[in-house]
Amino acid sequence: MDNAAGEMEVFVHAATLGSFSAAGRALRLSPSAVSKLVSRLEERLGTRLMARSTRSLSLTPEGELYLERAQRILEEIREAERAVAFGGAALPRGRLRVSASVAFGVRFIVPLLPDFLARYPDVQLDLSLTDGIIDLVGERTDIAIRVGALPDTALKARKLMESRRVIVAAPSYLDRRGEPLTPDDLDRHNGLTFNFRQSWEEWPFRDPATGRLFTRSVRGNFEANNGPTVRALCVAGVGLARVGRFHVQPDIEAGRLVPVLESFNPNDIEPIHAVYASHPHLAARIRAFIDFLTEGRAEGG
């Protein structure tokens, strides 16, 4: 390794083992050499990483952040070396952090996990389900599943599927409140919306006669930060919801939900992507999960 990587490895050993002496024994260096390398690293970075006392070492907040990143970098280096040593066939291993929307995760990812973990037992999968948009770097996430058009970004993306959005209601709600026949009828209906976008929503429509696109404001007495909760209230007959069809297709097929205002549907297709940080040497665990997810979507429809 070069000097920077060598200093990084010494720091990681000292931080995880708790002393310069223990790090020195592991690396076959003297405690003074370990101390000098850590000091040189701190001088190069211009910040203090460790608080030293006669009995112990403790990490500063900057040291904790550096340790987390350094461990990941060193694992990537080891993985690259394993790839070369075994003819490019690096085995997926290590912690894999994945984030997905609640609806997509529950329906399409969770059912695949037993097979994935059985195939790659050396991967420690950390799955977070949230309908909020996360910062991959800030949240230290390897892969995120994004629903909708992707903004201009340095992230790489693999398209998994597409889904059309649809307005649905339970038969019990329609029996009680009547079916909306035009978007103007939404003024008399209870809209179930999402609080992570804004406190109210405008739903898009297309005039079937002219093809003109327009929007209508939707109001209601319930908001949530995830699709399954909105879906549950909709199935219970509380109101109308506009959600991805992939999420409610089983409910539509079973008659628990009914699409409404379909003649005004703008057919806005939302792509669903797996996104990940761009890197010339993608970790084997990241590539394996994306390939497995793509394979599972192809088989599961």
Image (cartoon, helix red, strand yellow):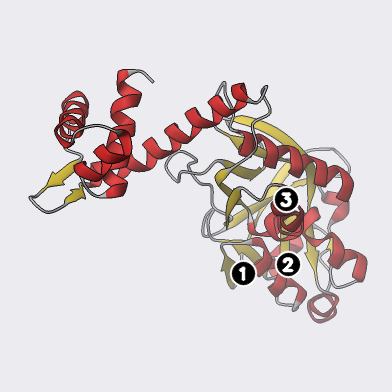
- Where 148 sits versus 264, above or below? above
Observer-nearest of 236 and 88: 88
Q: Earlier in the sequence, mark 2 or mark 3?
A: 3
Q: Residue at x 62, y 39 (%)?
A: 285
Observer-nearest of 53 and 250: 53
Q: Earlier in the sequence, mark 3 or mark 1?
A: 3
Q: Quadrant of residue 126?
A: bottom right
Mark identifier at residue 240: 2
Mark identifier at residue 220: 1
Q: Earlier in the sequence, mark 1 or mark 2?
A: 1
Callout 1: 10 Å neighbours few (<14), some, many (20+)?
Answer: some
Callout 3: 10 Å neighbours few (<14), some, many (20+)?
Answer: some
- Residue type at mark 3 is Phe
Q: Tell me where residue 32 appears, x and y as whole percent.
A: 14, 33
Q: Tell me where residue 264 appears, x and y as whole percent.
A: 83, 50
Q: Which numbered mark, 3 or 1, is in the foreground of this view?
A: 3
Q: Are marks 1 and 2 in contact (CB under 8 Å)?
A: yes
Callout 2: 10 Å neighbours few (<14), some, many (20+)?
Answer: many
